[in-house]
């Protein structure tokens, strides 16, 4: 079974509310030399413990049922080190959809259509397993080396196939992007992700329109 001694840290990639992410390299085994993304979950309170367990289980399901997805991450290893859960997944670029929108280039209509198609494909695969992401936003969408968008960060996600009752923690989503039924703590369904998808498409279109208007003035 893999542990922390299998990897060396190559660089720091970023952080979340309860996590740190690193690029690591395998130093032994059949995959020696291969690089991965390692997410270290910081167990600070009951909520962080809950989302750590939930994310690991969801990533295990994705790895088992959608192992060759272009739009969902693959979990290769998981273990405990220093009291923290470690999730080792496929390494994508360090760039997110936020970087694409604000730092790279002006999206064309074709770009927006292709990126939207990527997200629809990813959500279709996710929803076919009855998993709702619930925190879909530009920061949680990564750019793969092939140029596709990949949905990441499943710490707020819920596996609806095994969850019958919801509580306050299940509705702790980004209020600005949360679907009305989530904001009002009425229900959690995969439809909430479609609302978030609409917000992302709108953000892409608005950014394109704003940049073109600025260029023409």
Image (spheres, helix red, strand yellow):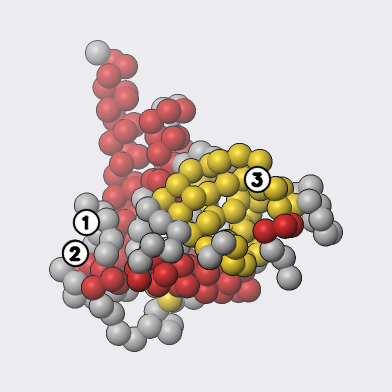
Tell me where residue 189 appears, x and y as whole percent. Answer: 32, 73
Q: Residue at label 2?
A: 183
The residue that appears at 27% across and 19% down in the rendered structure is 214
The residue that appears at 60% across and 63% down in the rendered structure is 81
SS for dot 1: loop
Q: Residue at label 3?
A: 9
Quarter holding the C terminus is top left
Horizontal arrangement in the rendering, residue 43 relative to residue 65 (left or right)? left
Circles 2, 1 touching at the beta carbon (< 8 Å):
yes
Tell me where residue 107 appears, x and y as whole percent. Answer: 42, 32
Q: Residue at label 1?
A: 175
Tell me where residue 121 appears, x and y as whole percent. Answer: 50, 59
Which label's residue is closer to the chain start, 3 or 1?
3
The residue that appears at 24% across and 62% down in the rendered structure is 179
SS for dot 3: strand
The residue that appears at 23% across and 67% down in the rendered structure is 182
Tell me where residue 183 appears, x and y as whole percent. Answer: 19, 64
Distance from Cα at disc 2 to Cα at disc 1: 6 Å
Circles 3, 1 touching at the beta carbon (< 8 Å):
no
Distance from Cα at disc 3 to Cα at disc 2: 39 Å
């Amino acid at each position: 079974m893999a542990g922390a001694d299998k990897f060396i840290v190559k660089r720091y990639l970023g952080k979340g509310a309860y996590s740190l992410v690193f690029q690591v390299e395998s130093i032994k085994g059949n995959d020696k030399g291969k690089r991965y993304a390692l997410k270290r979950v910081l167990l600070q309170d009951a909520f962080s413990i809950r989302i750590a367990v939930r994310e690991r289980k969801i990533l295990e399901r994705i790895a088992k049922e959608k192992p060759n997805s272009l739009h969902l991450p693959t979990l290769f290893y998981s273990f405990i080190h220093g009291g923290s859960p470690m999730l080792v997944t496929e390494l994508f670029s360090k760039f997110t959809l936020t970087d694409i929108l604000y730092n790279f280039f002006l999206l064309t209509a074709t770009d927006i259509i292709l990126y939207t198609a990527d997200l629809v494909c990813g959500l279709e695969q996710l929803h076919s397993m009855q998993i709702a992401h619930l925190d879909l936003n530009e920061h949680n969408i990564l750019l793969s080396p092939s140029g596709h968008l990949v949905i990441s960060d499943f710490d707020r996600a819920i596996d609806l196939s095994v969850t019958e009752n919801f509580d306050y923690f299940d509705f702790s989503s980004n209020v600005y992007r949360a679907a009305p039924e989530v904001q009002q703590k009425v229900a959690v369904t995969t439809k909430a992700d479609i609302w978030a998808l609409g917000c992302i498409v709108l953000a892409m279109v608005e950014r394109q329109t704003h940049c073109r208007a600025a260029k023409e003035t």
